[in-house]
Amino acid sequence: LYGSRHTIEVMNESSTTKEYVVVGHNCESGDILSPSNGNPEEIETRTLKEARIGDEVRIYDTGAYCASMRAKGYNSFPDAIEVMVD
């Protein structure tokens, strides 16, 4: 879980890229989705398509970030939308 590196993709038609640090919305030190390779305590930027408000961001192969592993109402957040892709 901690230190896992996932493929992250911004879903838009932009040809411009930008460096991003990707984190979850929980106030936890381990809620980092762009950790440094080999050091889960260190943050690393990812080069992604330039995102705009309203763009969908896909984070693949997340395992514990799926709905079946969530704590309902954790930190007063509503359930996240989960999309199954074949």
Image (cartoon, rainbow, N blue to C red):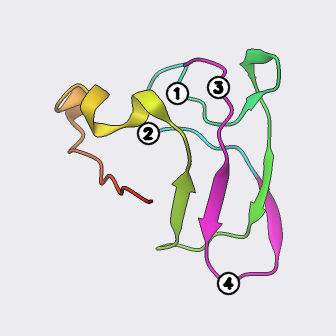
Query: Closer to the N terminus: mark 1 or mark 3?
Result: 3
Residue 58 screen position, x and y as percent: 54, 57
Question: Residue at point 56% right, 47% down?
Answer: 60
Residue 59 screen position, x and y as percent: 55, 49
Secondary element under disc 1, as helix, strand or loop, is loop
Residue 47 horizontal side relative to residue 21, left or right? right
Residue 3 screen position, x and y as percent: 66, 20
* Crowding at mark 4 (Cα within 10 Å: few <14, some 14-19, many 20+): few
Query: Closer to the N terminus: mark 4 or mark 1?
Result: 4
Choose mark 4 or mark 2, whichever is in front.
4
Numbered marks: total? 4
* Crowding at mark 3 (Cα within 10 Å: few <14, some 14-19, many 20+): some
- Give whichever of 28, 83 is nearer the camera: 83
The tag on residue 13 is: 4
Query: Closer to the N terminus: mark 2 or mark 3?
Result: 3
Give the spatial CA distance, label 1 vs label 3: 11 Å
In contact (CB < 8 Å): disc 2 and disc 3? no
Question: Residue at point 57% right, 39% down?
Answer: 23
Q: Main secondary structure of the magenta part?
A: loop
* Crowding at mark 2 (Cα within 10 Å: few <14, some 14-19, many 20+): few
Give the spatial CA distance, label 3 vs label 4: 27 Å
The tag on residue 4 is: 3
Residues drawn in magenta: 1-19
**Mark 1: amino acid:** Asp
Q: Is residue 26 visible?
A: no
Secondary element under disc 2, as helix, strand or loop, is loop
In contact (CB < 8 Å): disc 2 and disc 1? yes
The residue at which mark 2 appears reads as 25
The tag on residue 31 is: 1
Choose mark 4 or mark 1, whichever is in front.
4
Quadrant hosting residue 81? bottom left
Q: Is residue 68 magenta?
A: no
